[in-house]
Amino acid sequence: MEPSQGLDAAGPGPEQNTKPELSAAMRAKIERNRQRALMLRQARLASRPLSAVEGATSAKVSKTIDSGAGFFIEEEEGGAEEQRARKVVHQPAPVIEPDYLLCDECQKPFMDSYLSNSFDLCVCDNCRNNEDKHKLISRTEAKQHYLLKDCDLDKREPPLRFILKKNPHNPRWGDMKLYLKLQVEKRCMEVWGSEEALEEARETREENKEVQKQKRFNKKVKELRRAVRSSMWTKDTSVHQHQYGPEEVVDPEEDLYKKTCTTCGHELTYEKM
C-alpha cells in the first residue's frame, strides 16, 4: 500500500506534462470568438441600463403588503424607475409645410374653401360671388337654357361636379342637382363652339316648338269640328213607304206591267193573270 502511495505522490509522468501547441489559425479563431462574445455582452448591457456598470448586479426587491384578507401581496420596488429608464423616446416627426391653393380671383394662397371642395374651383371664400359669377343653377335649367344633354353633363370628360339639395317645392320629391353656372357655361362653349352657334340652335328649337304648337292646335280644331258635325246630324231610322204612280204597260202580249215610286224611283214589275 505504501509503495503505491509514493508513486501517486510523485506525480504524472513526462508524457502527461506535454501539451499540444495551437496553430495560428486556431488562435485566430479563438480570438474572433472572444471578440464576438464581448460584443454580445456589451449589447446585452446596453439593453439593460440599470446593470450597465461593470461588476454591478440588478436584483428586484419585492415588498410584502398585508392585504388584511388572509393573504399577502408582493409588490416589486424599483419597477417605476426601471420603466422610466426603459421608456422609449421617439424622434419628432418632420414638419411639412401645407400645400396652399392659389385663388384665381385675388391671387392669394388659401388652404380650404367651399368652391374648391364642392366644385374643384380654386376660389377662396372671400372672392365667392353667389349672386352672379358663382351662382348655382339646377340641372333642368342647364339643359333648357344652354341646350345641353345628359351625356354633356355626365359623360363628357371631365364630368361636371354638383351638389344635392332638397327640392323646395316638395321635400318628398327627389333631391335637386345644382351645378356651378360658370362651369356650365364653359361646358356649353365646348359643345356648341361659339355664342352664334348657340343662338342659331335656340332659334331653330323655338321654330320647331312653334310648328309643333300649331300642329297641336289644328288637330284640336279638327276634332272639335268633327264633334260639332256629329252632334247636328241625325240618322233617319224610319221605314220608307213606296208611293207608286200610275200603272204602265210593259208588254201586252205577256201581260207585264210596272209601277214607279214617286219618292225613290223604285220600279215594280209584275204580271197580271
Image (cartoon, rainbow, N blue to C red):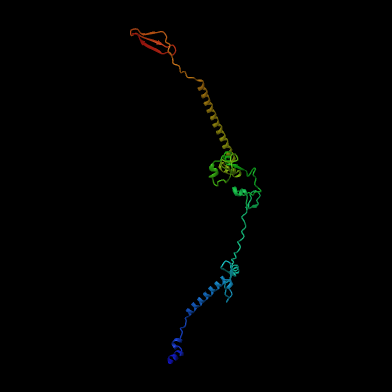
Q: Is residue 219 above or below residue 61?
A: above
> Which residue occupies the extreme bottom position in the image?
3
Which residue appears at 36% of the width and 11% of the height?
Answer: 270
- In the drawing, does residue 26 fall left or right of residue 146? left
Pick the residue in front: 172 or 130.
172
Pick the residue in front: 5 or 52.
5
Number of callouts: 0
Which residue appears at 54% of the width and 30% of the height?
Answer: 216
Pick the residue in front: 93 or 1.
1
Q: Is residue 40 above or below residue 111?
A: below
Q: Position of residue 69 (x, y in %)?
A: 57, 66
Q: Is residue 76 above or below residue 265?
A: below
Q: Position of residue 189 (x, y in %)?
A: 58, 42
In the rendered image, which quarter contains the C terminus?
A: top left
Pick the residue in front: 78 or 72.
72
In the rendered image, which quarter contains the N terminus?
A: bottom left
> Which residue occupies the extreme top position in the image?
252
Q: Position of residue 28 (x, y in %)?
A: 49, 78
Q: Position of residue 232 (x, y in %)?
A: 51, 20
Q: Quadrant of residue 60?
A: bottom right
